[in-house]
């Protein structure tokens, strides 16, 4: 037994007494009940412990003097600790024995101090959509509670629902937890709908704050419609899963099943009155006070008495990965990352060598795609987004005075709103998010595309191609070979027609270090 788990009980003091007697040289079989009780009273006085001795624990104490011990206890039980008894104890525990008792009494002091230590409760928040990250958070929280020897795990729920696979994995973690798990819909105004209702019922004790609601747990197929046979299979499977948990918890399984088949919802009072939950509490502290002394039966049949009054509450801190994944699991954030990522990649392609936009764009695009991969995609919305990009490109290529660009912006807004097909509003993309993304993105994209096309139409002025079209002057007659002066340099040139010295020529081709030129007629039309 670890000292951190040890409370100062009569059993511990009896064991301590046996050790002391053995250290003092007294054989246990020679120890009388009177001597043992006097020793226990002495230890109690020395430690100033304030508790009632329960000598019934000594039924399993393996001393031959147990009978005389009990007889002495019955005679001693109604007495106070008198000076005569204390004098006898002081004579019994001589100086040499006291020196040997130092280490043993120190252990008793440590155990006495541990008795006053408040129990610890670990609280973890499950808010937003239930997804694979939720199951990971619960798993890590349970492991932390086990390592810290927490009295229980408090799961605070505020969720509209989520994915069934993630919900089942979360329930598996809860029912297999080594400590009691309390599920609590809080704060006031929160809800545990759909998949959240399953997790609420999975707790060893289910509780709700005033002004909360739960239920509406009918399963739906994300991104499509279920045929009647498949719909019935999914409903029956979900109902059986919920009944197996609710019945074990001693709750109203028939009413809980209606939350699946009829999508019924319940207020905190309705859930309490109909035995779907055990408690209604104002906050965490009120809940722990009401849980104190309650006996819970876990799914494996073990019974645990909760000691939670005055417990310290520690909140589970998510790691960096969990924070990032929880943030991008919001479809609005996923769309923002995807659009910004696409923009960064496009900037890198149009301006090679910048590097930073390409790297950041690729990271954001991958994060956005990873979040959207677990969400129900509506392919009509995806097609509208592709149409928007096409219209932006056409607007930059053709002079339509912004008509194609406006059509692209509208198509992008509609595509973003329709991209996620879910009956849960929290899992859909908001109209405000779509507009805030579409308008700036359309303007930036059209601006970049127009700059690119304008640059492609601009005449090349560097390298060998930059010489084409340049105008020079013949230094020597070209018949057909000669020299010309162009761009501040002397070049060998050849002309298909004769050019007199001083005549103007235009470069039409270049072959290594020799230019091919053609004569430019004089402005007055005279022959050269």
Image (cartoon, rainbow, N blue to C red):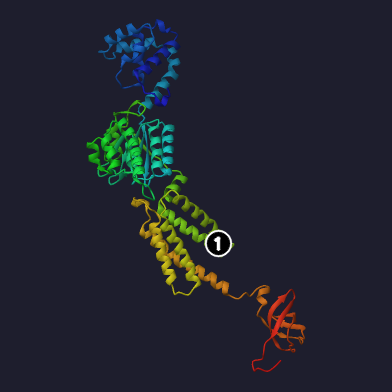
How packed is label 1: few (under 14 Cα within 10 Å), some, or many (20 or more)? some
Image point 46% across, 53% down: which residue? Answer: 368
Is residue 237 among the parts visible in the rendering? yes
Q: Position of residue 359 (x, y in %)?
A: 54, 56
Left or right of 20 on screen, residue 292: left
Residue topped by disc 1:
348
Left or right of 362 on screen, residue 145: left
Q: Is residue 222 above or below residue 455?
A: above
Q: Position of residue 420 (x, y in %)?
A: 39, 54
Q: Quadrant of residue 179?
A: top left
Q: Is residue 175 above or below residue 95?
A: below
> In what element is the residue under mark 1?
helix
Count of residue discs: 1
* Closer-to-camera residue (55/381): 381
* Closer-to-camera residue (14/204): 204
* Closer-to-camera residue (222/145): 222
Image point 54% across, 73% down: which residue? Answer: 454
Which quadrant, please, contains the C terminus?
Answer: bottom right
Q: Position of residue 2 (x, y in %)?
A: 43, 24
Q: Position of residue 466 (x, y in %)?
A: 65, 75
Image point 36% across, 57% down: which residue? Answer: 430
Q: Quadrant of residue 46?
A: top left
Image point 34% across, 39% down: which residue? Answer: 238
């Amino acid at each position: 037994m670890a000292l951190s788990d040890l409370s100062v009980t009569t059993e511990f003091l009896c064991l301590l007494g046996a050790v002391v007697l053995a250290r003092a040289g007294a054989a246990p079989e020679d120890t009388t009940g009177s001597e043992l009780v006097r020793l226990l009273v002495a230890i109690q006085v020395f430690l100033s412990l304030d508790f009632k001795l329960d000598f019934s624990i000594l039924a399993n104490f393996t001393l031959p003097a147990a009978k005389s011990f009990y007889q002495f206890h019955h005679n001693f039980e109604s007495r106070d600790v008198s000076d005569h008894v204390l004098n006898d104890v002081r004579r019994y525990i001589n100086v040499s024995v006291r020196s040997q008792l130092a280490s043993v009494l120190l252990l008793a002091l440590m155990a006495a101090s541990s008795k006053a230590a408040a129990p610890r409760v670990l609280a973890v928040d499950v808010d937003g959509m239930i997804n694979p990250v939720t199951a990971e958070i619960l798993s890590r929280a349970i492991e932390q509670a086990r390592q810290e020897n927490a009295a229980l795990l408090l799961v605070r729920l505020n969720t509209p629902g989520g994915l069934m696979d993630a919900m089942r994995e979360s329930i598996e973690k809860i029912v297999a937890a080594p400590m009691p798990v309390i599920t609590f819909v809080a704060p006031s105004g929160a809800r545990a709908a759909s998949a959240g209702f399953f997790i609420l019922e999975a707790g060893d004790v289910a509780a709700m704050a005033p002004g909360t609601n739960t239920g509406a747990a009918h399963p739906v197929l994300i991104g499509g419609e279920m045929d009647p046979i498949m719909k019935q299979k999914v409903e029956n499977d979900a109902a059986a899963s919920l009944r197996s948990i609710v019945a074990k918890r001693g709750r109203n399984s028939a009413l809980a099943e209606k939350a699946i088949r009829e999508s019924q919802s319940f207020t905190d009072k309705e859930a309490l009155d109909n035995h779907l939950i055990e408690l209604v509490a104002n906050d965490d502290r009120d809940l722990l006070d009401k849980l104190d002394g309650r006996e819970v039966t876990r799914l494996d049949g073990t019974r645990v008495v909760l000691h939670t009054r005055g417990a310290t509450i520690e909140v589970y801190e998510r790691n960096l990965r969990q924070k990032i994944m929880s943030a991008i699991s919001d479809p609005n954030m996923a769309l923002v990352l995807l659009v910004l990522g696409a923009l960064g990649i496009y900037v890198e392609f149009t301006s090679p060598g910048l590097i930073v936009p390409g790297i950041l764009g690729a990271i954001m695009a991958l994060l956005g795609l990873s979040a959207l991969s677990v969400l129900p995609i509506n392919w009509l919305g995806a097609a509208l987004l592709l149409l928007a990009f096409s219209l932006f490109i056409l607007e930059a290529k053709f002079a339509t005075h912004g008509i194609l660009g406006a059509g692209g912006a509208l198509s992008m807004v509609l595509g973003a709103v329709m991209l996620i097909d879910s009956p849960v509003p929290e899992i859909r993309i908001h109209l405000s998010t779509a507009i805030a993304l579409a308008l700036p993105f359309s303007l930036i994209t059209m601006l970049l595309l127009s700059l690119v096309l304008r640059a492609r139409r601009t005449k090349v002025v560097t390298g060998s191609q930059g010489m084409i079209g340049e105008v020079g002057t013949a230094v020597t007659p070209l018949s057909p070979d000669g020299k010309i002066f162009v761009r501040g340099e002397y070049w060998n040139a050849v002309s298909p027609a004769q050019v007199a010295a001083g005549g103007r020529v235009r470069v039409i081709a270049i072959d290594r270090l020799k230019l091919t030129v053609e004569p430019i007629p004089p402005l007055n039309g005279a022959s050269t």
